[in-house]
Every structure is written in C-alpha cells, then in structure tokens.
Image: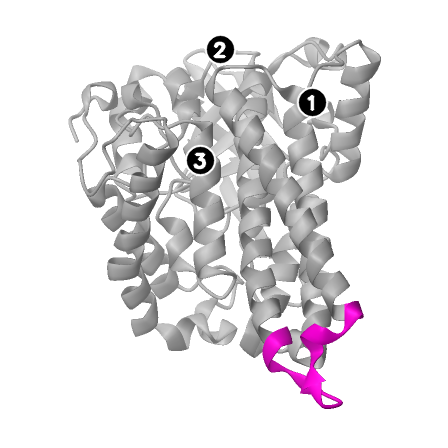
Amino acid sequence: MTTSARRSTPKPSTGAASLSTDLGGLEDLLGGLVSFIDSVVVPLEATHADIFQDDRAGYAPSGAMAPLVQDLHRQTRMAAADAGYYGMCVPAALGGGGQGPLLHYLAWERLYHRYGPGSHLPYSSIAHWARGPSHLFAAASQTLEERVLPRLMRGEVSLCFCLSEPDAGSDSWNLRTMAEPTGDGWRLNGIKQWATNGPTADYALVFAVTDAALVRQRRGGVTAFLVATDAPGFRVDSVIRLFGSIGGDEAIISLNDVEVSAEDVIGQVGEGFALALAGISLGRMFNAGRAVGLSRWALERAARYANDRVTFGKPIAEYQAVQRLLANSAIRIYTSRAIALDCARRLEQGEPLRKELAMVKAHTTEASYQVLDDCMQVFGGMGFTNELHLYRAWHQSRISRVADGSAEIMQRTIANRILKGDWDF
C-alpha cells in the first residue's frame, strides 16, 4: 500500500477486486472469500484447536485474549488483506474494495451460516466497522490516512469503538467524557464502557464532548478522536466478562489527561454523532447478518437431528410439536432474510432508511433468539452441551438483542418516525 491510503489500490485475488453489485458478481466474490477461509483460515485455527477450545488457554489472567490468540487474529486479518478480502467493504477511495451494504450483509450471513458459533478466526477475515477500517475514515485527516489507515487496511492493527459510558448507553446525549482544547490539540478525560475489542485494540475511536451547551440542547457538540491505546493516560481498567466466561472482548476504559493533536480529530469538531450513527448503522446490518446466519446454521442441524433421533419407536421429526418448532424457525428466518436483503439493496441505492434499519435490527435479532431457543429445544438436553456450540450461538443471539440498539430503542425509533408521518416502507 502506498503512503497515501486514498491513492492505494486493493490487491486483486479470486474475485475480490470485483466491484459488481449484481447478485451473480457478489456470489462469485462470496465464493472466493469462502475458498480463502477454507484453505487458509480454517487450517490455521485447526492447528491451534486446543487453545480455542479451552478458555483457560485462550484468555490471559486479565481476561483479555491471550497473546497467541491475538496474534492468530492478526495473522488472519493480514492474510485476508493480502488476498483482497479484508477491506472489500471499505470505500475504494480509502484503498478498499468499494463494496456496499448488500455485500456487507451477505458476507456476514454467509460466514455465520457456514462456520457457526464454534469458530473464531473466520470472522477476522472481514473488517468489522468497530474493529478495523470502514467508511468512517473518509472523514479522517490526511495525517491519519498516511499514519494509521494503511496499517489498518493491512490488518496489522485493530480498533475499538468508545461511545458508551456508565451513564450514557442508549441515551448518548448523556456523555460525560470531555475534550478540552490545549492550543495545538485536545486533552481527553472520562470513562468509556462496553468498548468492543477494547482489551486488545491498538487504537480507539473516542467520542467526547467539545461543546457542553450544544450537548445539553441535543444539537451537537460531540467530537470523534482517534487515540492510540498506548498513549499516556489511556488505560483499560477491566475486561467485562459475560455469561460466566473467564474472559471477554468488552472493556471499561478510562482516559486521564490523554493528549491528542488536532489531526487526530475525525470529521468536523462538534459533529461526531453523525459518524457514530453511521458506524452503528453498519453494526445493525452486521447484527442482522449474524442473526440470520446463525439461525440457518442452527435450523439445519436441528432438522438433521430430528430425522436421526428416534424416541418411542419413530424419529422425533414425525412429532407435530417438533415440526412446529422447525416450521416456526423457518418462517422467522425467511422473513428476517427478506427484510434484511430489501433494506441492504435500498441502502445500496442511497436511500435514507432510518426506521427500516431499526426494523431489520429489531426483527432479525429477536427472531434469531427464538430460533436458537427452539432449535435447542429440538435437541433436548444435548442442546445445552459444549459439544454442539448451540449455547454459544444462543449467547451471541442474546447479546445482539441489545448491541447497537436494543429492541425497545429500535421500536422507539420506528414509532417516532411513523408519528412524524414517515409511513412509506
């Protein structure tokens, strides 16, 4: 990659350089991505299966990913970048493949459907908006483009997204992290919570108040900064552990007199919420892709098990109660995929779909949660075992119902739009 990310060209590979937006072209691209993962990433993970199957080996005492696991994710990112897949949904002007929302959705659905919840490394083959490069960097300064973006595009380093705080979750206007001007830059002070990839990230995208009066009026006043996590005063206070795990991917982070330069501002001063919303919108489509993909993965396994499992002299697939679980799961998957694809296609055409995105996020994640629960029911006690990994899918599904906007917040967004006369779908 050249020193200027805007002038760089993504390395072509098996279909990865294609910018076709028709389904045939996208299928070729997805097929190439899967072939790359099957031939490069899956064997890498298999070589280290003992680490990925044992949380005590996979996490450090702090709760963060163990150094070897971090390095394996880095190797995956860099191999995917070299093959042309890692940044395929990053704008071409930033050195990416220029693909849009449709491929973004389809790729995440394909990966979660094919590799399921028991795999780890395949999901580092695509740049996730909160962990790596994305269209958010179109608003970065030339200095950041030349200093940081090329390393992100190569997969050498990763990001975390620092918006939420102890008193600012769904209500982001309640931010307390402050950025004070220092003459040639800014000084950041505050606490961030639920920072995904926070325990191990190299950089943090931090949102801080730069105009308290505008924030009180809910009219702006929040600015985005790119902060190196090894900067003096930047500290990971703790790793947030979920569902009884001994480690985790979320962090509580404190910033104590962290100095940043004027070039570290992303976007315009005081207009950071527009960037945050753009990122969260990507997150909602990611959650939809994961929800549908995991649901398809689970339903296929539940259906095979129903045909094989015999009780009282016949397969459980012949029992109406089991058929109902499978049929309702299929209905939920079909409707989820239909609205997600419709939304992605319309986003591809540039339509502003605020309420539709909220509908997709709410429906797909709620539906997936029920699908996973019903598929576990089909398996009976076996559905709870570590061996089948259904519990991992169920955990991810449960988290998705809150991440990037809970169902209740999505419903609030939808209702507000409808009450303002936005009645088209």
Q: Residue at left 60%, top 55%?
A: 295
What colour scheme was applied to this rendering of the protein?
A: one colour
Depth check: 340 or 419 in front? Answer: 340
Position of 177 with respect to 151 (left or right) is: right
Q: Quadrant of residue 152?
A: top left
Q: Which mark is residue 268?
A: 2
- Where does label 1 land, which residue? 355
Q: Amino acid at mark 3?
A: His
Q: Quadrant of the C terminus?
A: top right
Q: Residue 80: horizontal and vertical position, in percent?
A: 27, 47
Disc 3 crowd rating (10 Å Cα; few below 14, some 14-19, many 20+) is many
User: Magenta stretch?
Assistant: 306-321
- Disc 1/disc 2 C-alpha distance (Å): 26 Å
**Considering the numbered disc 1 on the image, is that residue within a helix, a strand or a loop?**
helix
**Considering the numbered disc 2 on the image, is that residue within a helix, a strand or a loop?**
loop
- Disc 3/disc 1 C-alpha distance (Å): 19 Å
- Mark 2 vs mark 3: give the one in front: 3
Give the residue at the far right of this rendering.
Answer: 419
Label 1 near label 3: C-beta < 8 Å? no
Depth check: 56 or 96 in front? Answer: 96
Q: Residue at left 25%, top 19%?
A: 6
In the rendered structure, which disc, 1 or 2, sits on the residue that comes first in sequence?
Answer: 2
- Where does label 3 land, which residue? 104
Q: Quadrant of the N terminus?
A: top left
Q: Amino acid at mark 1?
A: Lys
Q: Is residue 130 visible?
A: no
Q: Quadrant of residue 134?
A: top left
